[in-house]
Every structure is written in C-alpha cells, then in structure tokens.
Image: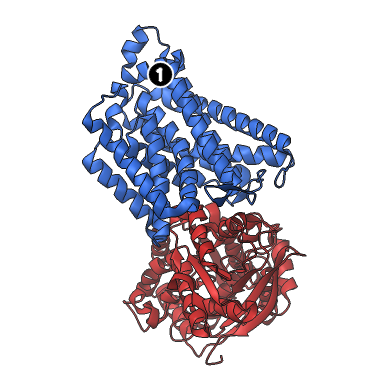
Chain colours: A red, B blue
C-alpha cells in the first residue's frame, strides 16, 4: 500500500516542483501563482472526494495525504471551475475499515458534484471500493495502494471490476507489490548476500502480497525460504512475536523479511528480534516500514529503536530521484507548517491528474454525470500522458502506472534515518 | 469449598498431563514464552473475573485499564530520564518496586473512580445498561490516551536488559521472562491469600454470594465493591508494567486485544473464579505458542476460540466453573 515515503522528502518535494511549474500537461500552469482560492469563486462547482484514514493509528499518513490534495487544488486552479475538496474518514475506531471505505465511496457516487476521488490509503479498503467506483464510472486515484490484486487480472483484479471490466475507473500512481516484493528479494540476495530467509507477514492484503512475492523471487534467485513459505501472524499476535522468533532462531536464518506495515507490527518485530538476540540478522521490508526517521514518533525506526534498526532495508514503490524535492516540501510547509507526509506528494499527483482532466474535457460540459464519465475516460486512456510532481507517466490497461521504479533504502545510523542507496527500474515495457 | 469427588479431579489431572506433554513437545524456550505471555493474560483476566464475580458486570474497560497502566509506566520511567537498561542491581530493584507501586496504585484509584462514576449509579439498573457503560468507558480511556500521547507505538524504557540471559533448565532464558513469570505468580498468590484469608476478602466473597445478606451481616457493600475494583485494576496496572518491561512498547489500542483475550481467559476458566481466570490465561498463552510452533501462527486466534468453544460445550460454566462464586 503505501508507497510511502519515498525518501520521504524526496518524494514530496519532487512533486512539488513539477506541479507548480509545468502544470502538467494541461494545465494550470498559470495557476501556480494564483491564489489560494480554489478556482475562483465563480464557475461550475465540482468536488474532489478524498477517502483516507483520518483518525487513529494511520492518521499520521492519512492527514498529510489529504493535505496534498488540498494543496494541489489550491495551487492549480482550473479556469471555469470552483473546485472543492470533501474529505471522508475510512477509519473506524482508529483502524482503516473496508466497509467504511465502500460507504464513503457510495456517498461520493451519490453526490453529483463529485467528479473524481483521491484515495484510499490501504489496499484492503481499495478492494472494497473498486467495485463501487467501477459500477458508477467514478474515477478514483490511489496514491498509496500497491496490492496487485486490485488491478492485475493474474491476481484477480477482474473480480473487482465486474460491472465494467473494460472501463477502468481505478488508477494508482504507486507501482505494485509484486514488484516491491521482487525488489526486496533482490536486496536480500544481491545486496546483502543472504541465502536463507525467514519471512513473516501480517496476513493483510498488502503484507501477504509483498511477502509472497519476496518468497517467490528469493527462491528464483537461488535462495532458501525457511519452512518454504511466509509465516502469517493474525491481528492478535501482532504485538508478541516472541514464540515465532524463537522458532526462527532455531532455523538460523541469515535474513528476515517482513510483509506488513509498522502499525501491524513491523517495528515491534525488529525490536523483539533484538531482544531475542537476533539483532545481527539483516532485516527487510517494503514501503510499509520506510515511514520516517527515528525521530518521527511511531515510525518503524522509532518503534524498533535506533540501535535495533541496524542492518535494516526497505523498498519504496516510487522514484527517488525526482526533481526539486525542496520546492514541494517548502510549499507544503508554508501551507501546513509541517513536513510533508509519505503520501502527500503522491496525493498531490493524483489531484493533478484530475485537475488536468477537468481542464481538458470539462470545459463547456454542464451535465455533471457526463463530466464524470469524460474525466474517467480521459485519465484511464493509456494514450494520455501526465506530467506530475512524480514525473511523467500514463496508466496501462489495468490502471497501473507505467512508472515501475523501486527505490531501495537502508537504515543509516548516523542520521538515524533511511538512506537511499539505489533505484531500480522493474518496468518491462519501458514507459 | 470444593468437593473431593472423582469428577473434581478430572480437570486438574487432564491439565497436568497436557502440560507435561506440552513441555516435552515445546521444549523449554517456547514453554517459557507461553508461560510469560499466558501470565500477562492471566493477570488481566483476574480483574475481569473479580468484577464479574462481585457485580456480574463484564467490565469491558478493563483491558484499557491495563493499557493505561503501561502508559503510566512509560510516563514514569521516561519522566525519570531512563532510556535503557539499568545495570546497578540495587537501583534496578528500587526502581522496579517504585514502578509497580505507582502503576498499581494509580490504576487502582482509576478503577475505583470508574466504578464510582460509571457503574455504581447503574448498580440496580438492567444488566445491559452497565455493560454499555463499560464499553463507553473503554472508548473514553482509549481516546484520552490517544489525545494525550498520540496514536503511534510508544517506547517504554526497558530498564531490565532484555538481552541478559540466565541458564534455566539447561537453556539460556531471557531474565526478563523469568522475572515476569515470577511477578505474575507472586501477585496471584497474594491475591488468593487476600481473598481467602482476610476479613476484607471474606467480605468480598460474601458480597459475591448474596449482596443483601452480606449487607445485613454488616458488610459495607459500596466499600467492598470499590475494593474489588481497586485490586482488579491494580493487577491490570501491574500487567501494564510487565508489558513495558517485556515488550518495551505500548499503544493506545493495546487494551482491546489484551482485554478480549483476558475476557476469553476468564470465561474459559469459569468467570467469577480467580483460579480459573489465571488458568485460562495460561491456557491461551499455551494455545497461541503451540499454534506458532506447529507453523499455524496465522490461525492462533482460531485455535484459541476453538478451545474456548470445546470447553464451553462440555463445561458450560468454564473449566473451574463449579467453584463459581455461589459456592465459594
């Protein structure tokens, strides 16, 4: 799911830049200067729906992502439209909830002024929402979902878009876990030189997908996976990995891989590895654990502890080397008096697509239902190339981005933060 | 209080056989893991079962009292400036005692306040009313903590070096685990002695059996119930300290899962029965560890609840349900 912080700032920053300057293919370049207002008070009133976990444990990711949308709307006004943002929370009792996500999507569908949606954050929420947006033909762009099951026919993506299998309504700017898992295995095998891995997943859509792909690729590269498969831990075990680690230790692994996020136990697993005397074994994970420096409260590095995080690797399904990251970060900081979150830039990019479509196909369209359908068709069209803060890309026939770049990070004890060390392009077809 | 019949011996003997077989299967390291996590569940379960025993309320806020206990531990140790292990034995013991005392007393008082504000006014209301109130208190505690410390995982200074090991049963075992097991068992014994041997304990037992009759015999009901909440919540507070020592982290949502498991433990052992609750906690710890050792860690909860269902099918009042409060 998360494309997480690409090198945190980097990402964010990146987007910023492009966003403002190029204004993407379409538009609003002028906008940059413009005012903070949403497109001027007059003009057709349209709404961009936003669905993220805005409360509870994932609020630290959801809130900055929603801010990315608001910042994009503010910085890129579309002439003739008055764009507003409607943010709904998909967390129930502090935890992202697929049913709540589907309910929110229905609310957007039933609001004629909503022309497109940015969200969700979690892949399992996406699985509940895609049937809704697909049936309604309402374009939805996720900044963070990385589960291949949401889009790829080989992973069951068609099951989610049964109503209009050929009309893609769900697109995403993050690449998929099957690629991130492969990148994780690449780090373990080629960078670390590990040959015998112990794999744990949190049994969620994201974590399991990531771990399964790691297992597959690691074996293909020639490595051995202890017990042949990933060890899933149910929700109740996500605070106590002691027994599992005692098992792992007996098998003497030279790498431990975790498919999951910090809130489902990533940091605790690493911390408990150290408590069990397994701290010298290299540890890896996906973007779910690359979520900020040790000083960021609640991040993987913070939960595990700076010392425990030694020899930890992570991947991020995003481009590290994006232009002018500082510009986005400073624009964001000026607006919200905080550093951008891991998904702020990606949410900004999603919003850019929508504003771009609005500008290109929306002018003169007064029927909001028609507008919705035109926006969907414009964005999903593989021939449309977008220029965003994340760079240039288009969406393929499943709604996945043509950018398949994975950035690899390692914990750096000096800065007590993740440090980018390489970026690999796993895209087969080029863009 | 228990009848020495053939039937009464079935459960203990079966459990003993199972424990021995499991020890051979699990090997000492995992056996100790199971005792440790089971002990934490047991400590929380005691509070559930004591409250149920005396006012027949399933105190859903109890898991959150445990969570608050871990937060008190975090606040205290962080506030005192500790960051890692204390290697001075005397200082360590002094700080440990102080931490347990503070966390237990603070949470005991919180428990009494909760009872006074949220449950006592509803004591004679239909049973559904206090149950809903309890759920409400649970959310209130979670939200307060979330507002104060935030939603993320918070580190608790691990003042006992988690990596220091001692040789035990031929294997190197983390000292913290043995300490946790020791504390849990010591607190349980203290509770049994208190309930079984003191006048206040007798008052608690008589209130559990028949509140009106106890009151006619001169037992101060309000005080006795408040005392029950104090002790139950203090034990949850102690479990919170243990959580901090053992795992080194806490979170505002910690109480939900822990509470659910402790509640399950209390039902498994026969709700209202303190020995049963302790037993239930250990059983759940063992079931989880066994599931992991078998390679079915993702099914651990299913295993736990399967055991619960099986026990309830054959013994609807739980393993030690015969000794329910009515017969105490």
Asked whether residue A362 appears in the rendered view, the answer is no
Q: Could you tell me which quadrant the N terminus of chain B lies in?
A: top left
Q: Which residue is more in the foreground, B10 or A406?
A: B10
Label 1, on which residue? B204
User: What is the chain letter for disc 1?
Assistant: B
Decide: is B94 above or below A25.
above
| Residue at image coords 56%, 59% | A269
**SS category of the residue bearing label 1:** helix
Left or right placement of residue B32 versus residue A270 in this view: left
Residue B65: % across, % down? 51, 36
Choose between A81 and B199: the one closer to the eye: B199
Q: Quadrant of residue A288?
A: bottom right
Residue A88, placed above or below residue A150: above
Q: Position of residue A321 (x, y in %)?
A: 69, 80
Q: Is residue B309 visible?
A: yes
Q: Quadrant of residue A69?
A: bottom right
**A252 or B252: nearer the viewer:** A252
Q: Nearer the viewer, residue B33 or B259?
A: B33
């Amino acid at each position: 799911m998360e494309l997480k912080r690409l090198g945190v700032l980097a990402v964010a920053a990146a987007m910023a830049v492009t966003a403002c300057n190029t204004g993407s293919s379409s538009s609003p370049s002028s906008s940059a200067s413009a005012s903070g207002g949403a497109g001027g008070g007059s003009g057709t009133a349209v709404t961009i729906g936003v669905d993220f976990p805005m409360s509870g444990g994932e609020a630290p990711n959801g809130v900055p992502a929603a801010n990315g949308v608001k910042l994009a709307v503010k910085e890129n006004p579309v002439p003739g439209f008055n764009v507003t943002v409607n943010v709904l929370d998909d967390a129930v009792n502090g935890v992202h909830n697929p049913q709540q996500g589907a309910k929110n999507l229905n609310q957007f569908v039933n609001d004629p002024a909503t022309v497109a949606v940015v969200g969700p954050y979690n892949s399992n929420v996406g699985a509940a929402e895609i049937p809704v947006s697909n049936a309604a033909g309402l374009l939805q762009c996720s900044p963070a979902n990385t589960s291949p099951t949401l889009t790829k026919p080989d992973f069951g993506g068609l099951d989610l878009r049964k109503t209009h299998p050929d009309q893609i309504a769900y697109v995403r700017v993050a690449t998929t876990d099957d690629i991130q898992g492969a990148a994780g295995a690449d780090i373990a095998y080629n960078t670390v030189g590990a040959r015998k891995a112990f794999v744990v997943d949190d049994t969620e859509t994201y974590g399991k997908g990531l771990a399964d792909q790691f297992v597959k690729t690691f074996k293909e590269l020639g490595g051995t996976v202890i017990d042949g498969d990933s060890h899933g831990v149910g929700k109740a075990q996500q605070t106590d990995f002691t027994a599992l680690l005692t098992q792992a230790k007996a098998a003497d692994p030279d790498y431990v891989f975790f498919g999951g996020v910090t809130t489902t136990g990533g940091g605790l697993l690493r911390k408990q590895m150290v408590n069990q005397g397994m701290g010298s074994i290299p540890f890896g994970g996906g973007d779910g654990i690359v979520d900020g420096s040790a000083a960021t409260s609640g991040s993987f590095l913070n939960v595990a502890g700076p010392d425990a995080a030694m020899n930890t690797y992570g991947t991020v399904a995003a481009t590290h080397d994006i232009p002018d990251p500082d510009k986005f970060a400073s624009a964001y900081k000026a607006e919200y008096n905080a550093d951008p979150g891991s998904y702020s830039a990606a949410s900004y990019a999603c919003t850019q697509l929508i504003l771009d479509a609005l500008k290109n196909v929306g002018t003169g369209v007064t029927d909001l239902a028609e507008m919705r359908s035109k926006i969907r068709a414009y964005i999903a069209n593989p021939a449309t190339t977008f220029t965003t803060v994340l760079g240039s890309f288009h969406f393929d026939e499943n709604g996945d981005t043509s950018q398949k770049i994975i950035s690899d990070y390692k914990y750096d004890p000096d800065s007590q933060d993740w440090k980018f060390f390489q970026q690999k392009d796993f895209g087969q077809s080029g863009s | 209080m228990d009848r020495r019949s053939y039937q009464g011996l079935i459960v203990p003997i079966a459990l003993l056989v199972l424990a021995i077989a499991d020890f051979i299967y699990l090997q000492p390291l995992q056996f100790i893991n199971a005792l440790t996590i089971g002990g934490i569940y047991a400590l929380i379960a005691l509070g559930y079962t004591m409250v149920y025993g005396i006012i027949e309320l399933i105190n859903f806020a109890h898991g959150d009292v445990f969570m608050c206990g871990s937060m008190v531990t975090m606040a205290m140790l962080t506030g005192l400036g500790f960051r890692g292990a204390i290697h001075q034995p005397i200082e360590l013991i002094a700080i440990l005692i102080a931490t347990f005392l503070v966390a237990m007393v603070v949470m005991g008082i919180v428990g009494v306040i909760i009872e006074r504000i949220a449950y006592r006014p509803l004591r004679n209301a239909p049973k559904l009313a206090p149950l809903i109130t309890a759920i409400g208190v649970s959310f209130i505690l979670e939200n307060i903590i979330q507002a104060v410390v935030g939603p993320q995982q918070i580190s608790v200074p691990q003042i006992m070096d988690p990596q220091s090991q001692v040789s035990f049963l031929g294997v190197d075992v983390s000292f913290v685990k043995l300490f946790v097991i020791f504390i849990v068992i010591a607190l349980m014994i203290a509770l049994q002695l208190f309930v079984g041997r003191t006048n206040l304990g007798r008052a608690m037992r008589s209130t559990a059996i028949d509140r009106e009759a106890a009151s006619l015999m001169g037992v101060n009901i309000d005080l006795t119930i408040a005392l029950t909440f104090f002790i139950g919540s203090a034990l949850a507070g102690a479990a919170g300290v243990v959580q901090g020592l053992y795992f080194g982290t806490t979170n505002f949502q910690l109480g939900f899962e822990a509470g659910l498991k402790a509640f399950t433990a209390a039902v498994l052992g026969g709700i209202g029965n303190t020995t049963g609750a302790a037993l239930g906690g250990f059983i759940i710890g063992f079931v989880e560890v066994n599931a992991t050792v078998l390679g079915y860690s993702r099914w651990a909860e299913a295993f736990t609840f399967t055991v619960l269902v099986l026990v309830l099918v054959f013994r609807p009042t739980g393993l030690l349900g015969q000794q329910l409060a009515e017969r105490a």
